[in-house]
Amino acid sequence: MGMINDIIENAKEIFLKFGEKANDAYDVTKLNALKSRIGSDIDKAYKKLGEEYYQVCKSEKLDTADFSALLSTLDELHAQYDTIVKQIEDIKNLKRCPVCGRAQENVKPFCADCGAKL
């Protein structure tokens, strides 16, 4: 009977670990979708900024209030994007190289790109 209980306990542990990995994968998928949406919003804001700049150059009238609002929006979107990237890296257990900034698996002692010690 002890062997069957051991098998059942081992199976439970495996299913719990699988469940945790599945939850992590689900969280990363949701964060990637959000990251993609924010990236699209950033692209739209840059396009709007370019259109505004074009109109200013064409009319030779400079209204910095319009640019300030667009710049604030872009700063906020970039901050949200960076936060999501950090959350994904935390879930995937990634670490950023202090020299080149590339995200890498936390288990590696050196950066795969520049060779710096992690």
Image: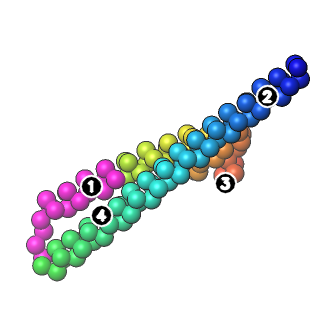
Looking at the image, is mark 3 or mark 1 nearer the viewer? 1
- What label sits on residue 73 in the rendered view? 1
Q: Residue at x 31, y 50 (%)?
A: 76
Distance, label 1 to label 2, CA atoms, is 54 Å
**Residue 14 or residue 4, whichever sits in front:** 4
Identify which amino acid the numbered label 3 is placed on.
Answer: Asp
Evaluate if marks 3 and 1 touch, with contact meaning CB atoms under 8 Å apart. Answer: no
Q: Residue at x 58, y 41 (%)?
A: 23
Looking at the image, is mark 1 or mark 2 nearer the viewer? 2
Whichever of callouts 2 and 3 sits on the residue coming sooner in the sequence is 2
Q: Which residue occupies the extreme top position in the image?
A: 2
Q: Visible in this render: residue 76?
A: yes
Q: Residue at x 45, y 59 (%)?
A: 36
Secondary structure, mark 1, is helix
Evaluate if marks 4 and 1 touch, with contact meaning CB atoms under 8 Å apart. Answer: yes
Evaluate if marks 2 and 4 touch, with contact meaning CB atoms under 8 Å apart. Answer: no
